[in-house]
Image: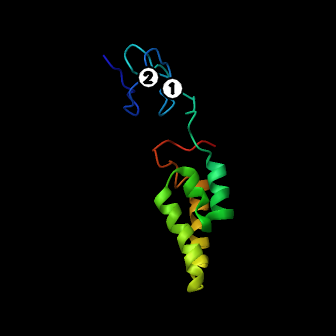
Amino acid sequence: MAKFCTNCGNELKEGADICLNCGKIVNEKSGVEKTESKATNPNAKSKIAAGILGILLGSLGVHNFYLGYTGKAVGQLLLTLVGWVICIGPAIASIWGLVEGIMILTGSIDKDASGRKLVD
């Protein structure tokens, strides 16, 4: 019988004591959390890296590619590249990226596209 993490619902591998999706320490027999976990998900993205990418390269959508928000990232990239025709596109994309970078660093945006919490 399969066991599931009580925190995120992800199916646990046999004998696992850490959920690979959310990083919680779990009891491999019952799937319930053993203790308050400070373990981090090995697939978690860095909040600082994403924020800095947003501030410095936000107009190209690099921070959204990093976090897995591909659709939004392509939109920012196209707004910058195609927006040169109307001259205001790159400015809009730059402000958009700057605002998202600040939101990431302040914690307003705290998850990646897969729903994993960003780590410091």
In the rendered image, the quadrant that contains the N terminus is: top left
Q: Is residue 114 visible?
A: yes
Residue type at the position of mark 2: Glu
Q: Nearer the viewer, residue 54 or 36?
A: 54
At horizontal 49% and vertical 41% (from top left) the residue drawn is: 116
Name the residue beneath numbered marker 2: 33
Residue depth check, mark 2 versus mark 1: number of the one nearer the observer? 2
Q: Is residue 38 above or below residue 111?
A: above
Name the residue beneath numbered marker 1: 36
At horizontal 54% and vertical 74% (from top left) the residue drawn is: 79
Question: Which type of secondary structure does the marked residue at label 2 adopt?
Answer: loop
Q: Are marks 2 and 1 in contact (CB under 8 Å)?
A: yes
Residue type at the position of mark 1: Glu
Q: Answer few, some or many: residues within 10 Å of disc 1's Cα (few below 14, many 20 plus, some between 14 and 19).
A: few
Instruction: Tell me where residue 110 appears, x and y as whole percent.
Output: 52, 49
At horizontal 43% and vertical 16% (from top left) the residue drawn is: 14
Q: Nearer the viewer, residue 98 or 107?
A: 98
Q: Is residue 92 visible?
A: no
**The quadrant where residue 43 appears:** top right
Instruction: Tell me where residue 86 appears, x and y as whole percent.
Output: 56, 86
